[in-house]
Structure formats: C-alpha cells, structure tokens
Image (cartoon, helix red, strand yellow):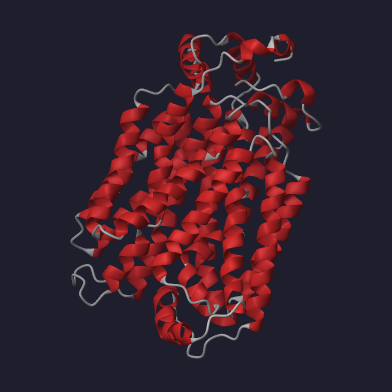
Amino acid sequence: MDEETPLLHRRPASSESTIKNSKLFLAVFSAVLGNFNFGYSLVYSSPVLSVFKSPDADPRLRMGTEQAAWFGSIYSLGAAAGGLGAMLLNDMVGRKMSIMMSAVPSTVGYMLMGGAVDLWMLHLGRFLTGVAGGMTAASIPVYISEISHKGVRGALGSCPQITAVFGALALYALALVVPWRWLAVAGEVPALLMVVLLVFMPSSPRRLLSLGRPQKAKEALRWLRGDQYNTDIELSAIQHSINTQTRLTLSQLATPNYYRPIAISVVMRFLQQMTGITPILVYLEPIFAKSKVSLEPRFDAAIVGGVRLLSVVVAASLMDKAGRKALLYTSSMLMFVASLTLTMNSHTTPCPPGPAPPNLTTLSYDLHNDIGSALESSPQSAAALVPLISTIIFIFGYAMGWGPITWLLMSEVLPLVARGVASGLCVAVSWLTAFMLTHAFTHLVDRYGLFAPYLLFTVVCILCLLFNAVCIPETRGRSLEEIEEYFRTGRSFTINRSNSTAQPS
C-alpha cells in the first residue's frame, strides 16, 4: 500500500473524472431492495394486528393478548437469528450471495402469512421474514461499502436506511386499500425483484481477490467504475490489504487493530437501540395517548414516516460533506434535548387513572381505547403539542445520525478478515437489544409511567455523545485500506488529509 499510495496522489485530477457511477448505482439499487423488504416486513404487524384481534376475525386466526404480543415481537428474534446466520454466510458464499439467499426465508414467510389457516403459520411466517431482515441487515451495508469508492460511499451507505423507510411507507399506504393477505403477497415482490437484478450484478472485488481470482476482480471493478477507469492502483491497494490479513485467531482479537473496530461497531449498535427508537416507534400511539396528545391513528405513520424520510435524505446529502462525527454529534444533541423535554413533560403529566395494563398488547391497544375519548374531548393547547414536537425532533435526530451512520461505520471500520462474522454479530446484538428493551419498556411504563424510560433514554444520549467524542474516528474521505491502517497504527491516518480529500466525480 505504501508503494502505490504516492502514485495515487500524483495522478492528475482529470484522470479521476473517468469514474462513472451509473452501474455502481444500479448495483446498489439492486442490493437495497432487500432493505426495502426489510422496512416493509418490520411494520407488517402494525395494520394487521387489529384485524386478528377483532371479534369478526377467523376463529382459527383470532389472537388474544399473548398471541398478538408474540406476533409483534417475534420478528426481532428472527432478525437476530438472521444476523447470526449471516456471520457464516458472508464468508462462506460472499456478500452478494448472502443477500440473494435472504429471499428464501422472506418468500416462504410471506407465503405462510398470506395463506395462513392457523396461528402457527402467522407466527412462523413472521419469524422467517425477520430472519430475512437480519440477513440483509448484516450483508447489504458490507456489500455496498466494498463496491463503492470513497467519493460516494457515505451517500450510498445511507441508502439502506432510506429504502427501509420507503418500505415502511409503502406498507402503510397499501394497508389503506389492500387486505392483510394481499399485503403479504405484495411483500414477495421486492425480494424476488432483488434476486433477478443481483444475478447480473458483480460480486465484491475484495471478495474475488480474496478467492484468488484477480481477473474477475478486475472485470468487476471496471464494470463498477466504467471502461475508462484505471483499475490497477485500486486493485493493488485492495490486494495489499488482503495480503496483510491472516485468518483471525483468538490471540489476534487481543490486538487493537482487531478488537477496537469490532468493539466500536458492537457498542454503536447497542447504543443505537438503547436510545429507545424501537419502543418509541412501536408504541407511538399509546405513548401519545399517555402523554395527552390527541392524534388520529391514520396520521401517525404519515408523520413519522415523513420525518424519518426527510432526515435520512438530509443525512445522505451531508454524509460526505459534514462528516460522520459532526452528524453524530448533531444527532445525539437533538435526541438528548428531545428526550430531556419528554422526561420533564412526563414527570409533570399525571398518569391516567385505572389499573396498569398487564402486558405489551394491553398497553398498545386497551390504553388508547380507554382514554381516547377523554383526550379527544379535551381542548388542544400549546402544552399538549410538546410531546408530539419532541417526539418528532427525537426521530429526526436519530434518523439523520445514529440511524444511518451506525450502519455505514460498521461496514467501514470492521477489519476485512473479520468483516463477515463481525457484521453478523453486530446485527444480532442490535436486534436482541431491541427485543429486550421493547419488553422492558412495557414493564417500566406499567410501574413508573413514561418518566422512567424517557430518563433512561436521556442518559443513553449523553453516553452517545461521549462515545462519539472519545472512540469513533472520522472516516469521511478515507478508503477502506486507510481506515484499516488507522486501527493498525492506533494513532493517525497514514495519508495526509490534504491528499486524501480529492474525490472522483
């Protein structure tokens, strides 16, 4: 790498303009269809649970509180299992093939739900779509980072988050006019389209070089960068990185160039979920009801989805301009201010009278129904809008920083030799944390009201600020090889900032 680097920076600026991104964008689009399906399947339970709990539901499919709770939460367990499975598949069959294989549990899961005649089919289908979501979450960010050049890697790294938001919006829109069975059938379309398109997309050049197929790697890189691109320098840098890697052993995990990036990625995924974003999104309607905010349910998804979409678009546009750390600071501060406001507001807002709901489903449905009429009859005031505005700010802050950047940094900083396994581990940690926090949120609200979880989220936001300041490196404008060298040296990047900021067009 040290021999090729000076040549890279002596190249005239005009030669870098020969990079063409059109085919790269097509490859990224093909992959992130898996994230579209992920966003779609994640919120599938939201509009259909009311159907299954209705007295008019098919007796074989009618759900009580316990069955409905499992139907809503079992997706997270499936996603954790999918993330662990991706640990093996990413290195055994490659990133691209792992993404394609996720279509199998996704399609089978939707078929089971669409044709369900018993509750076990609904639960198994929901679990399998979660498995597919975990597989894509672990594989797609790594694939995108390995086929992208540093000039657009930040923006393209936000695409999984953006398409997941689009998937959720598509589900909510279809649910207005499409029955629940056809919602499941429609969920098969993006997964099948993803497989068809990925067949024609190249594998990661890094993957091909690691398999000892330099000619195939050169063809893949030229396809991604354009016919006029000189692939030799980039391939040499990748090959050098691969040559310096050995099979990961337990003793190597004790060295900083391995355990530091893995620890950073795992802790980021843990903190990402501990901010409370999952329970806030899952319990949005009962939270508004308990906070004395009157909002018609059909507007919930539109407002939240619109805010999430706007914020991830803003993050994508600023990723390679403002830098990762600046956006993480901004994101942490917005979430801190919003959660602190929600903490103070919930401390001064008395809990509605009546017995505490015994479980998750009672919180989600009975609470809103019990006090809904009282809320609707109360006069709207400026104070009543504080929880709504604070929640919107919290979601905006999360989706412009700790949402997409956590995925991007995971794919950037993980060492090549451990990238497949570690990315699966990160996804598993994320989803297990989400599952446990979602259930813990219910118990905290039952016993202490909203004050306790909001206070916890406020403290976590402070930890996010400190972790970003102390542990997270700025990777904007750095190649994956430079990032690996940073962790290897432990001090600074080996190429001066002035030289590394030249970006291909």
Measuring 37% from the left and 63% from the top, which residue is drawn there? Answer: 46
User: Which of the pair 23/447 is nearer the observer?
Assistant: 23
Write down the quadrant of residue 42 in the picture.
Answer: bottom left
Q: Position of residue 469 (x, y in %)?
A: 77, 47
Residue drawn where x is 21% and y is 63% of the image: 118
Tell me if I can see residue 403 in this picture. no
In percent of width and height, residue 129 lies at 35, 50
Of residues 485 and 41, the one nearer the viewer is 41
Count of marks placed on residues: 0
Whole-percent x and y of residue 382?
Answer: 61, 77
Q: Is residue 339 above or below residue 293?
A: above
Q: Nearer the viewer, residue 158 or 6?
A: 158
Figure quadrant of the N terminus: top right
Say above or below: 283 vs 149.
Answer: below
**Toward which corner of the image does residue 45 lie, by quadrant?**
bottom left
Quadrant for the C terminus, please. Answer: top right
* Rendered position, 352 above or below 184: below
Residue 457 horizontal side relative to residue 162, left or right? right
As drawn, the residue found furthest toward the right would be: 491
Identify which residue is drawn at 60% across, 45% down: 406
Q: Position of residue 412 (x, y in %)?
A: 62, 34
Instruction: Look at the image and tell me whether residue 22 can be seen.
Output: yes
Left or right placement of residue 499 versus residue 225 in this view: right
Foreground pick, 241 / 408: 408
